[in-house]
Every structure is written in C-alpha cells, then in structure tokens.
Image (cartoon, coloured by chain):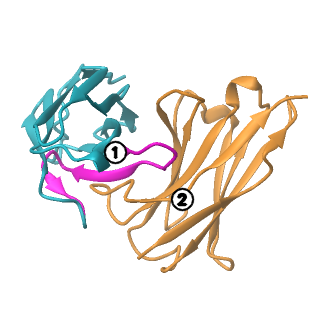
Chain colours: A orange, B cyan
Amino acid sequence: QVQLQESGPGLEKPSQTLSLTCTVSGGSINSGGYYWSWIRQLPGKGLEWIGFIYYSGSTYYNPSLESRITISLDTSKNQFSLQLSSVTAADSAVYYCVGGATWLQLLAYWGQGTLVTVSS
Amino acid sequence: DIVLTQTPLSLPVTLGQPASISCRSSQSLVHSDGNTYLSWFQQRPGQPPRLLIYQISNRFSGVPDRFSGSGAGTDFTLKISRVEADDVGVYYCMQATQFPVFGGGTKVEIK
C-alpha cells in the first residue's frame, strides 16, 4: 500500500516561501494515473485543497492560492513538493500530502500531516 | 464555486444506534462524464482524514459495511448503521466534480 510522509520546517517567517516535501513509499510516484495532492487544515478548522500534480507532471491549483503555489515532482527521489510563497500567519496550518490512483479515489492515501507555523 | 453544506454540525449518538449526516451541494455534482464525484472522509481526533466512501456509495478498501453512502444530484447522505466508540470524530464530504471542495464537517460524539 502506498504510504506518504511530509517533511519540512515547522516554523516559517512571514513573507518567506514555505517548502514542504512528501516522500512516497510502496509505489512509484510516476505510476500511471496517480494524483499527488496537498491539503491543509487551519487550526481547529476544516480542510482546504491546495492543488495536485498528476504523475505526468501536469498540475492543477486551487484558484484562490494559484498565484503563490508551485507543486513539483522529483521522480529520482520518489517525492513531490509544495512551495507556497509570501506566507502570512493565515497560512499556519497542518499540511497533508495525499495520493490517489484515480480521480474517483483522489484522496485515498494520506500522510500524517506536518504543522507549519508562520511567525516572526 | 460549489459550496457543500453539512448538517448537523454536531451529532451526539448513543452507542449501537444509527447516525446520519447530510451533505447538500449548491450545484449538481453530476460531471459531464456521467460520474458524481462525491466522497466522504472520517477524521478521528489527532489523525489525518481517512477516505470512507467515494462516488456517492462505494466503500473504500477496509471500510466496515456499517458505513454507507447514498444520494444524487445535490443531496447526499452518510449513514452509520450502528455507531461504535471508534466512530467518534469529524466527518467531511468532498466533491471533485469541479476543483475539490470540502464540506464544513460534522462532529460525531457519543452521548
């Protein structure tokens, strides 16, 4: 079964670029058909989909965040990454990386999540 | 943009009794390909969400058959036939007919 693990700094300064990495095990990140997503959960709040990258490298971002997001694949390391620029305190959240083999099961496999706090 | 409204916000349930959560969409979730991309997730305290149901009514691998999904168009329901202590948590619906959006969540707790 596919397993995912997020990594990255737990603390980021305002206006900086947040960079998170997700390491995938139990399967190849460029296996046909897989979608690799980032989801975030603000403290005590609900879930917000940030965007995804398809195994082929094409991306689709949440329109409300699109100008600040880059999601990329590193097939040599079996990882995918999120970069979120110009962060503010409002970006403090638990960030999850998630995988799915089809659009029907888009968010099937979840990482444990990583807490990111934006503060000076 | 599609908005998903879940009711109730909080659902106290007696162990062994059924529970039902509603998810209403601001637009039809039937995609042009004929599929309806409506899923349900369970988030236990301190845990990441877990996929329970996809495409309205299909249970994901390992999900007990106590969980069932139904509905069509704009109105959907998640039912737990007999609530167990392990079912405590927040339940979210999500649509992926357009860019993915989650409902606000329903907190299930034991009376």
What residue is rendered at 56% in x and 27% in y? A64
Mark 2: few/some/many CA within 10 Å (<14, 14-19, 20+): many
> Looking at the picture, which amino acid does disc 1 mark?
Gln
Secondary structure, mark 1, is strand
At a point 15% along the width and 55% down the height, the residue shown is B58
Quadrant position of the C terminus of chain A in the picture = top right
Question: Does residue A34 appear in the picture of this structure?
Answer: yes
Q: x%, y% of residue B30?
A: 16, 37
Residue A50 percent coordinates (x, y): 54, 40
Label 1 crowding class (10 Å Cα cut-off): few <14, some 14-19, many 20+?
many
**A43 left or right of B45 in image:** right
Q: Is residue A60 visible?
A: no
Instruction: From the viewer's side, name the closer residue of B97 and B8.
Output: B8
Is residue A53 shown above or below B49? Answer: below
- In the rendered view, tell whether residue A73 sits above or below residue B48: below
Labels 2 and 1 positioned on one and the same chain: no
Could you say which disc has been placed on residue A111 in the image?
Answer: 2
Residue topped by disc 1: B42
Residue A66, image quadrant: top right
Q: Secondary structure at mark 2?
A: loop
Give residue A4's position: percent from left, percent from top: 55, 66
Residue A10 position, x and y percent, is 78, 46
**Quadrant where the N terminus of chain A lies?**
bottom left
Identify the chain of the residue marked 2, using the numbered disc in the image.
Answer: A
Please tell me in which quadrant of the rendered image residue B3 appears: top left
Which residue is found at the position 25% from the left and 66% from the top? Answer: B62
Q: Are marks 2 and 1 in contact (CB under 8 Å)?
A: no
Mark nearest the camera among 2 and 1 is 1
> Callout 2, which amino acid?
Gly
The residue range painted magenta reads B43-60
- Give residue B19's quadrant in the image: top left
